[in-house]
Image (cartoon, grey):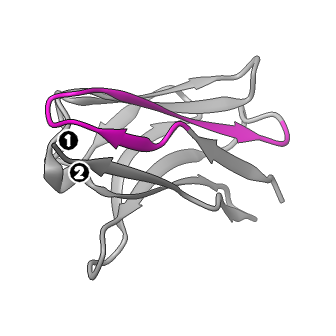
Amino acid sequence: QVQLVESGGGLVQPGGSLRLSCAASRNIASINLLNWYRQAPGKERELVATVTSGGSTNYADSVKGRFTIARDIVKNTIYLQMNSLKPEDTAVYYCNARSVLSNAWGQGTQVTVSS
């Protein structure tokens, strides 16, 4: 099972930007789905962005045009660039790697958007 470690969270003002990173313990090129999820207090975990092994990306409607997911298969790292952040983006963000035989999660990183 791949191990995942997120970093890059923090406190940012509305309209600001953050880049989250997710370092994987092994090669990610063949992993079917690399995802970023988030969970706000009192809410269910929701899928934010996906990048497939073929390089296709998909986003939740709430973040389209503001967030960008990317993977670096040399560094075995998944990124989430978040721009134009809003208070409603406040949540714990989790990295997820999903294949036929595995479903790995990171420990999460807190993102707080507040003035």
Image location (x, y in percent) of residue 68: 35, 27
Image location (x, y in percent) of residue 100: 68, 61
- Quarter of image, res 63: top left
Q: Which mark is residue 88?
A: none
**32 with respect to 39 (left or right):** right
Q: Residue at x 56, y 58 (%)?
A: 108
Q: Are marks 1 and 2 in contact (CB under 8 Å)?
A: yes
Look at the picture and state if 110 lies above or below 115. below
Magenta region includes residue 17:
yes
Range covered by the magenta-colored residues: 8-26
Marks 1, 2: nearer the viewer: 2
Crowding at dot 1, Cα within 10 Å, few <14 / some 14-19 / many 20+, comes out as: some
Q: Residue at x 15, y 37 (%)?
A: 14
- Determine whether the residue tagged by mark 1 lies in a helix, strand or loop: loop
Magenta region includes residue 97:
no
- Quarter of image, res 44: bottom left
Crowding at dot 2, Cα within 10 Å, few <14 / some 14-19 / many 20+, comes out as: many
Mark pair 1, 2: CA separation: 9 Å
Q: Residue at x 67, y 56 (%)?
A: 99
Q: Who is closer to the viewer here, 97 or 13?
A: 13
- Determine whether the residue tagged by mark 2 lies in a helix, strand or loop: helix
Q: Which residue is mark 1?
A: 63
Image location (x, y in percent) of residue 2: 80, 52
Q: Which residue is mark 2?
A: 89
**96 with respect to 76 (left or right):** left
Q: Residue at x 23, y 27 (%)?
A: 16
Question: What amino acid type should be assigned to the residue bearing mark 2?
Answer: Asp
Question: What amino acid type should be assigned to the residue bearing mark 1?
Answer: Val
Extreme-front residue of the structure = 115
